[in-house]
């Protein structure tokens, strides 16, 4: 049994219901869309966010998550899925987790429309919930994610090499969705403002750790579910390289590295040089330390809640996010 199966055991039935409902809301008359949805289900990972929603709702409720939390998890995962499709088009990615992307199987036009179809399905789901607080959160997620992605491209273009800027961007482009999952799970159980805020913070911390781990993957030459070196090819300077650059002593080396980053397109030779530099100057170790700081803080907040199978699984989920290899 895989680690994620053990983690989701307290909400196993919930996860099954989630998958059924996810497929149902995406039912379509289009053969292309039906094929795309089938392929998406095989390439979008372990569904960490829906599991997070279920476990938080179960912990707060002291039992099975309410049905409404399944509805909420579905619409949040729809938003995430739509952004993945659009990201693959923008990044010109050919594979995701070893599977061909939709823009390769079809073309960019069709892939964008498929992402829009899924995003529209999420908005329908949000309205069907009839909860204005949830609708407000969902309505703001797309804006935050999009702005975060645009800011990342801006930073790459302008070589804005600041750790503070990096954290701010990944908070906006990734952590906001994790935070929304946690907050909406609390809303669905009727939790008070204190719990909403605390669990929103837990979600944000886990999202920050999740993105840093993703960024670390980019520095290794192995199949971890996305093309390695892809961020560097786009000029995106993530935490491992940011830290390594901060250790540069000589002006000549700094000039050389900045010149490599400013090239468009960045050559494979430059990608290799920058990757090796990040690895040899402690970039991965530093990024992992920061990642674990976020995990530890999230677990400290979770430990404020009474012991239960749900809390135990949430703590294990935090560790999984920090240690995952895909």
Image (cartoon, rainbow, N blue to C red):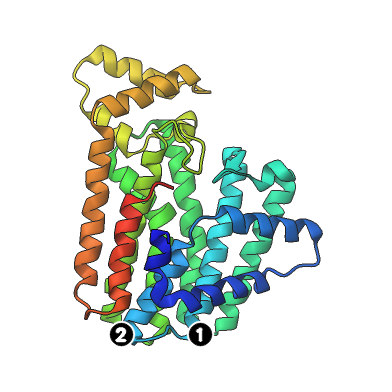
Residue 219 is labelled as: none
**Residue drawn at the location 31% of the way across and 52% of the way down:** 322
Other residues around mark 2 within 10 Å, as few (<14) / some (14–19) / many (≥20): few
Q: Which residue is mark 1?
A: 67
Other residues around mark 1 within 10 Å, as few (<14) / some (14–19) / many (≥20): some
45 up-or-down from 69: above or below? above
247 up-or-down from 66: above or below? above
The x and y percentages for residue 197 are 29, 73
Distance between mark 2 and mark 1 Cα atoms: 19 Å
For this orientation, the residue located farthest to the front is 1
The x and y percentages for residue 73 are 50, 72
- Mark 1 falls on what kind of element? helix
The x and y percentages for residue 284 are 28, 36
43 up-or-down from 198: above or below? above
**Residue drawn at the location 49% of the way across and 78% of the way down:** 14
Residue 192 is labelled as: 2
- Mark 2 falls on what kind of element? loop
Q: Verify CB contact (< 8 Å) between mark 2 and mark 1.
A: no
The x and y percentages for residue 323 are 32, 50
Instruction: Report whether residue 205 is seen.
Output: no
Nearer to us: label 2 or label 1: 1
Q: Quadrant of the N terminus?
A: bottom left
**Residue drawn at the location 46% of the way across and 75% of the way down:** 12
Nearest to N terminus: mark 2 or mark 1: 1
């Amino acid at each position: 049994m895989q680690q994620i199966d053990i983690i989701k055991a307290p909400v196993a039935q919930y996860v099954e219901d989630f998958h059924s409902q996810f497929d149902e809301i995406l039912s379509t008359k289009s053969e292309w869309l039906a094929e795309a949805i089938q392929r998406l289900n095989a390439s979008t990972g372990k569904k960490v966010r829906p599991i997070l929603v279920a476990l938080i709702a179960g912990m707060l409720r002291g039992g099975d998550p309410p049905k409404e939390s399944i509805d909420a998890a579905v619409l949040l995962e729809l938003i995430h899925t739509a952004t993945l499709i659009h990201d693959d088009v923008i990044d010109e990615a050919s594979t995701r987790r070893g599977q061909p992307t939709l823009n390769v199987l079809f073309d960019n036009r069709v892939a964008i429309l498929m992402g829009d179809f899924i995003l529209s399905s999420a908005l329908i789901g949000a309205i069907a919930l009839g909860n204005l607080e949830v609708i407000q959160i969902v309505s703001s997620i797309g804006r935050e994610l999009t702005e975060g992605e645009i800011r990342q491209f801006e930073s790459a273009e302008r070589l804005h090499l600041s750790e503070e800027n990096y954290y701010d961007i990944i908070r906006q482009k990734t952590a906001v969705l994790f935070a929304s999952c946690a907050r909406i799970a609390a809303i669905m159980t009727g939790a008070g403002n204190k719990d909403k805020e605390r669990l929103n913070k837990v979600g944000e911390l886990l999202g920050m750790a999740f993105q840093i781990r993703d960024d670390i993957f980019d520095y290794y030459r192995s199949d971890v579910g996305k093309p390695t070196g892809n961020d560097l090819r786009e000029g995106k300077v993530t935490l491992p390289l940011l830290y390594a650059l901060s250790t540069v002593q000589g002006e000549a080396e700094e000039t050389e590295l900045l010149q490599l980053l400013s090239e468009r397109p960045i050559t494979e030779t430059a990608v290799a040089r920058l990757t090796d530099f990040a690895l040899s100057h402690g970039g991965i170790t530093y990024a992992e330390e920061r990642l674990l700081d976020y995990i530890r803080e999230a677990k400290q907040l979770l430990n404020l809640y009474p012991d239960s199978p749900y809390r135990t699984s949430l703590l294990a989920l935090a560790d999984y996010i920090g240690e995952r290899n895909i």
